[in-house]
Amino acid sequence: MVIMEFNEREKSLIEILRNFGFIKEYGYKEYKFLYYVNAYPSVYFKNYQLNQILSIIGSDFGSNGNEYSIIIERRSIFSYKVIDVSDYYGTFGTTMIKGKNYSLKSQAEFVQMNLIPILKGKIWVDELKRK
C-alpha cells in the first residue's frame, strides 16, 4: 500500500477548512473549491437562506506560504453588497493593517470576533460600524 503525502495545494485547502470551520454553525456550507493548477487554493462557503457567501481566496502561492483575501457577499433581489474584510481591520480597534499578509488563523479569529453579526445576516457592515 502506497501512502501519499498531501501536496501544498491540498494542505492549503485543509488549512482553510480547519480555520473557517466555525462558520458552519451559522448555516454556511462549502459550495466551491478552487484547487487546480492555474488557480490558487480557495474555498467558498454559502449560506443559502441568507444568500450570502464567504470567500477565502488564495492570491499567492509560493515558498513563503499563501496570501488570502476574505470577501463577504450578500445578494438580494434589489441589491448586491460586497466587502473585503481587510478594509475593516482598523474599524474594530485591531492592530491588523490592510495590505499585510496575516495567517489564516489570525484572519479567521478577526472574522469570528468582529463579523459574526454580518455572517448571521442580522446586520451589514455599515450598521456594525455605527455601533
Image (tube, grey):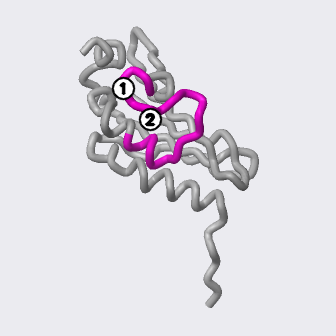
Q: Is residue 88 left or right of residue 39?
A: left
Q: Residue at x 36, y 26 (%)?
A: 93
Q: The residue under label 1 is which amino acid type?
A: Gly
Label annotation for residue 54? 2
Q: Quadrant of the N terminus?
A: bottom right
Identity of the residue drawn at 52% across and 40% down: 56
Q: Which mark is drawn over residue 124?
A: none
Front position in the image: 65 or 37: 65
Where 109 sits versus 65, above or below? Answer: above
Between 63 and 90, the one lying in front of the other is 90
The residue labelled by disc 1 is 93
The stretch of residues the image draws in magenta is 89-109
Taking the view exactly as shown, the residue that stands out farthest to the front is 95
Left or right side of 11 for 29 = left
Q: What element does badge 1 sit on?
A: loop
Q: Quadrant of the C terminus?
A: top left
* Residue, far top: 78
Q: Secondary structure at mark 2?
A: strand
Q: Residues within 10 Å of mark 2 (few under 14, many from 20)?
A: many
Q: How many marks?
A: 2
- 126 in relation to 2, above or below: above
Residue type (three-letter) at the residue carrying disc 2: Leu
Q: How far across and how far down the image is residue 113, in percent?
A: 31, 37
The spot of residue 4 in percent (x, y) is: 64, 78
Residue 71 percent location from the top left of the image:
49, 30
Q: Earlier in the sequence, mark 2 or mark 1?
A: 2
Give how far across and how far down residue 67 sits, in percent. Answer: 61, 42
Residue visible at 49% across and 40% down in the picture: 44
**Quarter occupied by residue 109:** top left
Q: Please state which of residues 12 and 97 is positioned toward the viewer in this rendering.
A: 97
